[in-house]
Amino acid sequence: MGGGESAPPEDCAAAYRLGQLIAEEGWVLLNGGRPAGIMEASAKGAKDRGGLTIGILPGNSARHASKYIDIPVVTGMGDARNVINVLTSDAVVALPGKGGTISEVALALKNGKKVVLLNFDPGKIFETYRESGLLRNAGSPEEAVKIIRNEFCSGDRGGRPAEVVKK
Amino acid sequence: MGGGESAPPEDCAAAYRLGQLIAEEGWVLLNGGRPAGIMEASAKGAKDRGGLTIGILPGNSARHASKYIDIPVVTGMGDARNVINVLTSDAVVALPGKGGTISEVALALKNGKKVVLLNFDPGKIFETYRESGLLRNAGSPEEAVKIIRNEFCSGDRGGRPAEVVKK
Amino acid sequence: MGGGESAPPEDCAAAYRLGQLIAEEGWVLLNGGRPAGIMEASAKGAKDRGGLTIGILPGNSARHASKYIDIPVVTGMGDARNVINVLTSDAVVALPGKGGTISEVALALKNGKKVVLLNFDPGKIFETYRESGLLRNAGSPEEAVKIIRNEFCSGDRGGRPAEVVKK
Amino acid sequence: MGGGESAPPEDCAAAYRLGQLIAEEGWVLLNGGRPAGIMEASAKGAKDRGGLTIGILPGNSARHASKYIDIPVVTGMGDARNVINVLTSDAVVALPGKGGTISEVALALKNGKKVVLLNFDPGKIFETYRESGLLRNAGSPEEAVKIIRNEFCSGDRGGRPAEVVKK
């Protein structure tokens, strides 16, 4: 998760690298699916490494998806799709963003999802969740992936067959 | 789309066969994702032929997905997820069902989606949509797939790369 | 519930009368809130008799509500708001409509809500619900209100204080 | 908006007073509708001054609404209803809360809604919105209402007839 049209180049570069690493781990990349900012960059990174990408779109048509999204999920629900983004994810990595990104971090933590903040310092607002072990900081895409692999993964893949997650 | 726990064996058999054919066409199968009735049977059919399956879940956890669903999309939105089912689909095949299935057929047609009714006779209620070419009947899974392939497909795959739809 | 822009004058006249009667009973009128067809007519009827009107809007702004709606609930969720329409209602009256209206009748019945079809014959599709007592036909607004008052009302008002429902 | 079961007595007292003041202004009070914390307290305050209260419920039944809610809007959509809370409001007052409340502040600001933080210091996270004039702090319910009345009100009531907002 992260900024859209307003995301600066350095954040997009980190998102691109994160997408590459997610694909290399054999994980599925999910984001908000639009052709902008962190979404576009992370999806491109995953595709460049042969990963599978899912985009949860706010609008009414798959035509508005990034071209790097394999599976556009069309919700027609606007910002309410942010809830789907986080409920569907096993772990959330948040790069810097504004209201939309902050809402996703907040909704993820509220629902007990593990969150890594990548180069994103929201101040003290989420500190109560840090104490419960749900929230971690990372200074690089590599560190974000390492935290998810080594500390967040519980061996529990929900209903997902291993061959998809580790395809 | 089609009945859940109440679906009779003959409908589940048709759904299983439909899932097989969808996978053989190289299409992605999407349904409501629960481990019951038409959803479970069609997903199993697709997996038995190596297809990719997506389930749009009404509840809050991927744990409640059918084991034949590769990608559980967790909405936590109850019946509101029916809208996502139809907006995300390029074409909808509806087997017999009750309120949930009828709502999906209605929402699909309202949104201009093409619908094939497979062994499902809802009476005259959707006749205005039949005249506009959105609604067709099929007497077998083979006929349903043939209608989609030969009459509904426009060559337009939304934002989806061909290698995923025709993976 | 009922048709929007496509609703014919006779249906709008029935909706207007229904709105009047709902207000006279002291009930709150809820509909989809847009300034068109059955929605506009029923809200106008209720306001002309001093009733309270709620509109569950599909769009992002209260500016798009009918001027006869007192309380515009802004969902930004498109057709997913149809679920809210029926879950929030104690009873649903459906006039003739297309996909949107049919989806509301279907979702209402699926969720155990009582439905009166007013001058609306959808054929046999909802017959299983008729047998369970959830579905009734009415030939006039007066008959629709009488069915709700005498046969559907259980004395149970959910969480609503009597002074609001019978304000 | 604000905390649920976890809200401390001093925040509930401020919410109760805020509800009183909202009713005295002739405004409609809207919150998440559950019988807990800031929701229950603010609704009780408004009812004690004869106000009108709306609750946007996450669950499937009006039975789970606070008894101080006049109009329970039943969404069945879980946290996705937070979007409705903020889109439906003309202005948002947020008392201290956790993920749910933070998501509401974030979604409100993203959608251009004016927000007053009442005794709630989320740190620097929303500072970019403060500069654009959408975000203000208040140290008392009286100050929050004064900011809304004197600085936020534009004379534009959306589609709402004045007699309802100023009933």
Image (cartoon, coloured by chain):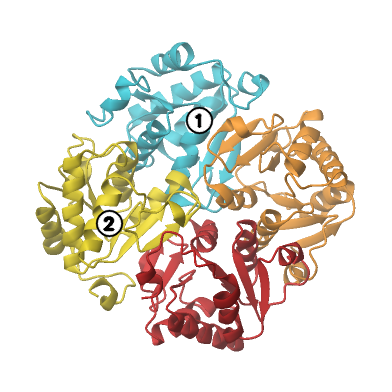
Chain colours: A cyan, B orange, C red, D yellow
Q: Please rate how many residues cluster around mark 2, counting C-alpha atoms within 10 Å: few if below 14, some from 14 to 19, many from 20.
A: many
Examine the rendering and report whether any part of residue A68 can be seen.
no
Location of residue D162 with respect to A68 vertically, above or below: below
Residue D108 position within the rendered picture, expressed as x and y whole percent measured from the top left: 30, 50
User: SS class of the residue under badge 1?
Assistant: loop
Using the image, tell me which numbered label, if any, was put on residue B126: none
Q: Residue placed farthest to the front in the image?
A: C155
| Amino acid type at mark 2 | Ala
Q: Please rate how many residues cluster around mark 1, counting C-alpha atoms within 10 Å: few if below 14, some from 14 to 19, many from 20.
A: many
The answer for which chain carries disc 2 is D
Residue A56 position within the rendered picture, expressed as x and y whole percent measured from the top left: 52, 41
Of D147 and A44, nearer the camera is D147
Measure the C-alpha gap from mark 1 to mark 2.
Answer: 35 Å
Q: Residue placed farthest to the top in the image?
A: A150
Examine the rendering and report whether any part of residue B5 can be seen.
yes
Determine which residue is flagged by label 1. Answer: A89
Q: Is residue A38 left or right of residue C145?
A: left
User: SS class of the residue under badge 2?
Assistant: helix
Quarter of the image for the C terminus of chain A: give it.
Answer: top right
At 11% across and 63% down in the image, what residue appears?
D150
Residue C46 position within the rendered picture, expressed as x and y whole percent measured from the top left: 43, 82
The answer for which chain carries disc 1 is A
Give residue C7's quadrant in the image.
bottom right
Determine which residue is flagged by label 2. Answer: D43
At 83% across and 52% down in the image, what residue appears?
B150
Residue C164 position within the rendered picture, expressed as x and y whole percent measured from the top left: 36, 70
